[in-house]
Amino acid sequence: MINTDPQDYIDGVLAGKRRMLSKTITLVESSLASHMVLARKLLDSLLPYTGKAVRLGITGVPGVGKSTFIESLGITLVAEGHRVAVLAVDPSSSRSGGSVMADKTRMEKLAVEENAFIRPSPSGGTLGGVARKTRETMLICEAAGYDVIIVETVGVGQSESTVASMVDFFLVLMLAGAGDELQGIKKGILELADAIAITKADGDNIEKAKKAAGTYQNALHFLRLASPTWIPPVLTCSAVEKTGIHKIWQTVLDHRTKLSNTGELAQKRRQQALDWLWSLIEEGLKIRFKQNPDVKRRLPQIAHAVEKGITTPTIAAEELLFFLDKE
Ligand code: GDP
């Protein structure tokens, strides 16, 4: 039996109690109708207490050093008196059953810190569904007093742009390659970055990392920048030797100061709220469409007719969408 009194959750979250925080997030992640009703009430009540955290997104291919970096940054921030929540968006976890991120024992040192809270990616559903839960979890963590929220993604499908659209600062971690720095980078990823950090800049790798940083910095010159105020810097760091980590955090803070002063940060968050609204509408419409009994009945035949070239996709889509009007 779950506790159905919203006030208990609200009080628990606002008091920063971890157990209640976890339980509230579990409710938000649930797809049971009764849980969803309760979750909506909770979110409504907690909303006034949200929005004050630094929201930092981090991406990079598996093995680039995300966990090690986040742990190192997290421990530094906690030592400075911050409260840090680490969330993940990993849409692959819903398909394979096992998440890349959850399988590994990750961030053990950070996990035991009193002022750190680590939550693996919600599983189940589409990227849109996973992202919605992570966004709501972010708000709950803010209400619980976490002032730095780190959202991590491995970059499956569109997950980088999804995470970029929910944070204030998007950090892209990169490995120094052997002169082929610009290969294998997913198109558009550099345009999302507020900073790039070349990881594992230690030992024999220091020179390579510096060289890679130069190459990326040049590449950035050719991009359309998101902000007139901010040129994304390319930095190097070593999470193992703990070098360059603080500089990256300082960069996040500089960005914050600059974009707050110009009003761009507030504008960015307003735009993100609107984008979120639209993605919820699109997601909701898709679900309603797929659950519509007439659509369910007709879809197999119509899809077949499209495949056979008996009808065009345009006409077929129109016929199916028409069923929504009749709801
Ligand atoms: P993730 O898959 O992106 O989360 O990467 P991990 O944090 O799990 O790191 C992948 C591997 O790189 C591990 O074997 C780490 O020990 C190693 N690694 C991570 N950060 C550094 C670093 O700063 N320097 C070096 N030399 N190795 C690192």
Image (cartoon, helix red, strand yellow):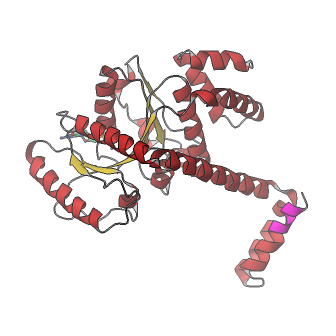
Question: Which residue appears at 74% of the width and 82% of the height?
Answer: 312
Q: Is residue 165 magenta?
A: no
Q: Is residue 322 magenta?
A: yes
Above or below, 80 against 309 in this view is above
Q: Which residues are magenta?
A: 321-325
Q: Main secondary structure of the magenta part?
A: helix
User: Can see residue 2?
Assistant: no
Question: Which residue appears at 9% of the width and 51% of the height?
Answer: 207
Question: Which residue appears at 50% of the width and 50% of the height?
Answer: 165
- Percent position (x, y) of residue 219? 26, 65
- Percent position (x, y) of residue 180? 21, 65
Residues 184 and 141: in front is 141
Q: Horizontal placement of 271 versus 215: left or right?
A: right
Above or below, 120 against 161 in this view is above
Question: Which residue appears at 26% of the width and 52% of the height?
Answer: 233
Q: Horizontal placement of 54 versus 7: left or right?
A: left
Residues 246 and 156: in front is 246
Q: Quadrant of the N terminus?
A: top right
Q: Quadrant of the C terminus?
A: bottom right
**Ligand 1 rendered quadrant:** top left
Residue extending furthest toward the right: 326
